[in-house]
Amino acid sequence: MPEVLKAPLVVEFPFTRSLGPVQSAFLTGLRERVLLGVRTTDGRTLVPPVEYDPVTADELRDLVEVAPTGTVTTWAWNHEPRRGQPLATPFAWVLVRLDGADTALLHALDAPGPDTVRSGMRVRVRWAENRTGAITDIACFEPYDGDPAPPAGHTGEFEDPITGIVAPARLDYTYSPGRAQSAYIEALSERRVVGERCPSCRKVYVPPRGACPTCGLATYEQVEVGPRGTVTTYCIVNIKARNLDIEVPYVYAHIALDGADLALHARIGGIPYDRVRMGLRVEPVWTEGARHPDHYRPTGEPDADYDTYKELL
């Protein structure tokens, strides 16, 4: 059997968001070692707080302090902590209903083993030494046998409130392309572009997915397309990617390769960004050892007539 292609992929970006008054107070409170919830119109206290009542959709602003002690409502043991998780040693994920709250907060519990954790056990917050106004200001929960710690009755007003946060988002996974895309990738290594034709509508899809998205039928007939094609639409990129050594601005375009019924996307080079246009005829530019074209450049041919690619926009 042929070797199954696979590759590790990472999608990572900083997620920046502004905070409304409720979330701002909650995160600022964590920085100041104060736990805040929000009271709903029917008298329940929600922790973590939300800005709209999940039942009535009413806006919520009535902040109330709750205790740093609480009760585990349910839990799951984490045998192998991953990068970025609260603790580096095995721990329990727990839902904790803090004293004074009607909902539970998800966090980590530092416990010696799963046999020491149970629903109903009492715990308290262990605060992080350095706090910045994030959920990580709670380092974790820890077992607690003492009396409930009464809240001080904080109003939720702070002199220096946090108004925005930047949270890293990251997804690690292993991708295997399957039969159709494996053939497409293998052809690219030979500097050819191969699609697959639907046996019913006869459209040629590039890159192939193994089935026609319109008819739902499996596709097996391979068709070599291109290498030249037509720019159907495009965008000008003005933000530099962290790991991409390309100066901005540059153009990313949808390109309908000759013989294909689906446009693929690629970078346009060899022409000033402000001269790229719909209908521009382009061809691939390969670099030594590359498994795919580095970019597409103008061929010098006359622009394609709009009617020849309007169905591929």
Image: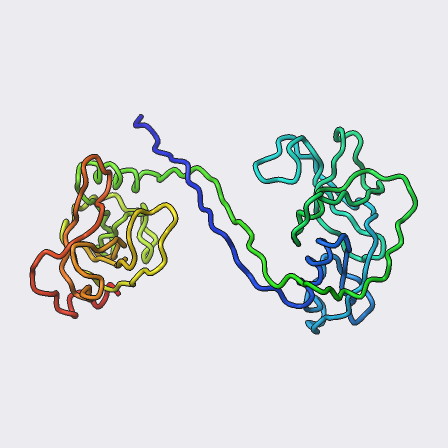
Q: Is residue 76 left or right of residue 178?
A: right
The percent position of residue 34, horizontal first and vertical second, equals 77, 55
Residue situated in front as seen by the camera: 31 or 93: 31
Q: Residue furthest right?
A: 147
| Residue occupying image coordinates x 64% and y 61% | 162
Q: Is residue 244 above or below residue 231?
A: above
Residue 258 is at least partly visible in this image: no
Residue situated in front as seen by the camera: 218 or 171: 171
Residue situated in front as seen by the camera: 81 or 173: 81
Q: Residue furthest front?
A: 159
Residue 211 is at least partly visible in this image: yes
The percent position of residue 150, horizontal first and vertical second, equals 89, 54
Q: Is residue 218 left or right of residue 257?
A: right
Q: Quadrant of residue 120?
A: top right
Q: Quadrant of residue 103?
A: bottom right
The image quadrant where one finds the C terminus is bottom left
Colouring method of the image: rainbow
Q: Quadrant of residue 92?
A: top right
Total marks placed? 0
| Residue occupying image coordinates x 27% and y 58% | 250
Q: Residue furthest top?
A: 1
The percent position of residue 144, horizontal first and vertical second, equals 85, 39
The percent position of residue 139, horizontal first and vertical second, equals 70, 43
Q: Residue furthest left?
A: 301
The image quadrant where one finds the N terminus is top left
| Residue occupying image coordinates x 25% and y 41% | 184
| Residue occupying image coordinates x 18% and y 46% | 223
